[in-house]
Amino acid sequence: MVVELLSYLFAGLSLGSTYVLVALGFTLIFGVMGIMNVAHADVFMIAIFTYLLITTGFDLPTGLGVVIAIFAGALAGLIVYWLVLKRIDKGHPVALFVSTLGVSYVVENFIAKRINFGRPSLEPIFGSDPIIVGGVVFTGPRLLLFAVTAILAGGLIFWLKKSETGMLLRAVSENAVMARVVAIDTNRVTMIAIAVASFVAACGGLVVGNMTLTADAFVANSLSLKMFAVAVVAGIGSVGGATIVGLTLGVIEAFTVAYVGSQWQNVIGLVAMTVVLLVRPQGLFGRVLRVG
Amino acid sequence: MLTPYAADIFVVAFTYALVTLGLYLTLLSGQFSVAHASLMGIGGYMGGWATTQWGLPFPVAIVLGGFAGAVGGLFIAFILQRTSGILLGTVTIAIGQSFSLMAQNWQTIGGSQGLGGIPLYSTLPYATFLLVLGLAAVLYVQRTNFGWQVQAAGRDETVAKSLGISIMSVRYYGFGFGGFLAGLGGVLLAHHNGVIDPNNLSFASEPLFFIFLVLGGYSSAWGAVAGAVGITWLMELLRFGGGKFLFLDQQDRPWLLGLVLVIVLIISPDGAIRRKSKKTQLAGAEA
């Protein structure tokens, strides 16, 4: 019984870690730019496909594939910012939002077409024989996912709190107008935020891809649902909140699948989001107001 | 007159036009919705269920599908009553996606296979009739006092509120009426394809309607219809000659269209065709 509960708990935590790794960047970008970047979940997918291209396509070593994939993911986020987000008038939030929607549509369909709408399999980055501790099975890829999530989420929270750049970033997300008044280069800060957010999502893509071992061009469609749910329930802009909520959502979902039925798995995020929006629209950990 | 092939494309175009009109209406009321593909899907499932399982006549199914879309829209408006702007838009994506995932896991309505065996009742007269009716209704309501209130609330919620306009009733109207039109489109689509499946509801089919709307121009109901009909035909015409052009083929159309959408938004965030009315000129002068 305990063993069973623990295995569901770990399954849930690994599901939750996936949500956390995408939601962190999404909420960070929203904080700094005040826009909902729908295309953010696609960075996750771009990293997986870059890795696929390098390792299977060019037959290069996996280590190189990992490095290039992470770099490509971070670059992809920045390219979208330079080419699209920066060029659209900030006075048109709907246009900005629809453009991120458009970007994700372009990227997904372009990549899907290149692989003829298939689902190629990936070479594992890191695998090991399962380790069994007291009946609970741990697999290498899952432990890697936990480790990466812990390092990235912890590192991000610490970086935002303690480093100078982190403080600048928080200043911009608290009040972009005032930040500009005190001569903070908001453009530079935005770029840093996007690079960091995309880096986190790219790492997420790789460690999750290492577990599923398949590359799906439309993975962002279901992933973005969880990304929004986590960010909204936590309160948009709250990085620590997104970590807690993401892990909790994953665990609740795993237990639901185990004890209630898999068809209800995707309903939980929606229900949580509905209740939070009705009772506390700013989210559990959210601030009330954002200026600029 | 029209060849069966052309009539068929017009049915599809008019179906899309109805959904785009619904999206236009919701956006006009100041509510940013990205769930119209789902509302369309709900209407399609309802209509398909009505004709296949309940054996109801097609016109009744159309009305039922429309109401199902409206109920879906009202549900979204109810959930989001304390949210607004872009956050609202994002949440509508999540809600739409949840509808799709629920349909996928609900075996009674066909699960991921979708609801099949729907009789092919959607003919050009039906599609034309519904589109004309929908367009006329939208144009009529816009000229009534309530229609002006909706547009006022869409432009500035705070000012509208200060004038005593109920924002909630505007929202229910935007999502309810918009959902109704999308639902009608869904019934037509289901009875055109003979099947409706969870992919029709999903977020992946949503950008299509934004492409229609943005290229047609957000600023009028005619633009929404023109965009949907024009682009559907354009996509069809690109099929001729084997659909091959340089290294591109038919399956390259989605991302090319998306690219056009993004480029148009960068150049002109208000949509490709802007209708300059007195009001927009005044709004421009203020800014």
Image: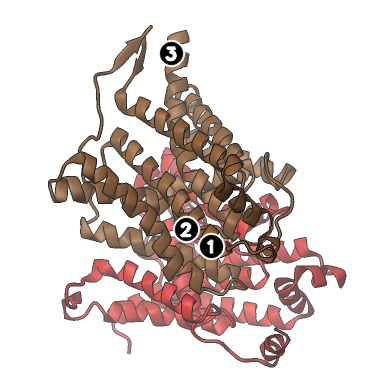
Chain colours: A brown, B red
Q: Earlier in the sequence, mark 2 or mark 1?
A: 2
Q: Label 2 to label 3, Cα distance in Å?
A: 42 Å
* Residue A215 seen anywhere in this rendered image of the structure: no
Asked if the residue at tag 1 contacts the one at tag 2, i.e. Cβ–Cβ closer than 8 Å, the answer is: yes
Q: Which image quarter is the N terminus of chain B in? A: bottom left
Expressed as whole percent of the image width and height from the top left, the position of residue A5 reads: 47, 15
Q: Residues within 10 Å of mark 1 (few under 14, many from 20)?
A: many
Tag 2 and tag 3 share a subunit: no
Pointer 1: what residue? B183
| Circle 3: element type | helix
* Disc assigned to residue A197: none
**Chain for mark 1?**
B
Give the quarter of the image for residue B144.
Answer: bottom right
Tag 2 and tag 1 share a subunit: yes
Q: Nearer the viewer, mark 2 or mark 3?
A: 3
Tag 1 and tag 3 share a subunit: no
Asked if the residue at tag 3 contacts the one at tag 1, i.e. Cβ–Cβ closer than 8 Å, the answer is: no
Q: Residue at x 32, y 77 (%)?
A: B235
Residue nearer the viewer, B59 or A250 = A250
* Disc assigned to residue A4: 3
* Residue A159 seen anywhere in this rendered image of the structure: yes
Expressed as whole percent of the image width and height from the top left, the position of residue A233 reads: 62, 42
Q: Residue at x 51, y 34 (%)?
A: A154
Pointer 2: what residue? B44
Expressed as whole percent of the image width and height from the top left, the position of residue B61 reads: 51, 60
Q: Nearer the viewer, mark 1 or mark 3?
A: 3
Q: Which image quarter is the C terminus of chain B in? A: bottom right
Residue nearer the viewer, A170 or A258 = A170
